[in-house]
Amino acid sequence: MPRTWSELLGDAEGPEETAEQRAGFFGSLRDSLGKSRRALTGELAAAAFDPGSDEDWERLEEALIQGDVGVRATAELVRRLEARNELGDLGSALAEEIADMLGEPGTLNLPSSPSVILVVGVNGTGKTTTIGKLAQKLREHGRTVLLGAADTWRAAAEEQLEIWADRAEADFVGAAQGADPAAVAYDTVEAARARGKDVAIVDTAGRLHTQSNLMEELAKVRRVIEGRLEGAPHETLLVVDATTGQNGLQQARLFGETARVTGVALTKLDGSAKGGIAVAIAYELGLPVKLIGVGEGLDDLRPFDPHDFARALVSG
């Protein structure tokens, strides 16, 4: 069954989800990964897979690469499947190996009050919306939250985040457009400490991973947070748009180097045929996917479950 928010947050106790709700969440995930599943398995479903056929293994490799699993992860998947004494059902075997490569389910590291989450990514990935939904879920699980608008470049970015703060009943720290993002991050941490908040989430401006000056600005934001609170930021989440496919892998690689990313939120899976990118990011970079977005609703931001994801990606 899908992971719960209590499991993601490491709560011994928390709002319970019914079996019906959890089954519904898996159904949403399965539906959202429909395009990715068809891209990955459509060609293979047309004929029985023969483990003794080099042509069938080549078709499997092509299908995995087409599904944006990536060249290195594809090679490893094929190696593992070939090493099995009994392949049995290809879909089940593939789902098992993908789940194993995705790694153990991650948790959000929120060890102290305040704990600081820094959220980074390129333009248009859904960072601010993800932050808003995460803030609401944290509140539902008993955390007090403060949101900081360190995206001081995009027009209306501050207003958008403030709307989410109101919805989540979270405190808010903003600044004038063009203000120093590092100063806003500093003020956010200071306000969270002064007001006794459990979690501070810092939004940052979208930037291309190829823009070295903006990536250095991001590194400065991180240094300021580190200098203000020991151990912070406790989480650095990279928001990746699943529709970007292998470009998302390059984003994860470069943001990981600059911002020291601790986990990935993979958004827009409901509109993508490239869900295999989760496997590439986890296997090639060792970065855990912690959150997935499968729609516009509040409950469409979910904790990532490797086994459910692999099953939905391969066999539905």
Image (tube, rainbow, N blue to C red):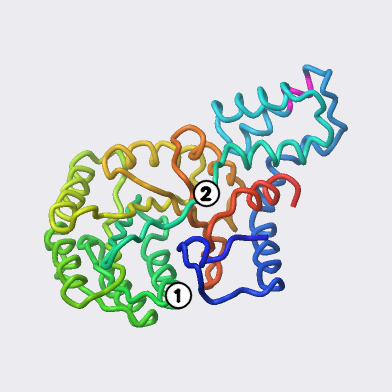
Residue 234 painted magenta: no
Per the rendering, the mark at residue 243 is: 2
Q: Residue at x 24, y 67 (%)?
A: 149
**Lower position in the chain sequence, tag 1 or tag 2:** 1
Chief SS of the magenta region: helix
Tell me residue 209's x, y (percent): 31, 41
Q: Residue at x 67, y 50 (%)?
A: 35
Helix, strand or loop for disc 1: loop
Residue type, label 2: Thr
Q: Quadrant of residue 190?
A: bottom left
- Dot 1: few (<14), some (14–19), or many (≥20) neighbours within 10 Å? some
The answer to whether residue 33 is above or below residue 163 is: above
- Assess whether mark 2 and mark 1 are in contact (beta carbons under 8 angstroms): no
Q: Quadrant of residue 77?
A: top right
Residue type, label 1: His
The segment highlighted magenta reads: 55-59
Query: Circle 1 is placed at which residue position?
Result: 141
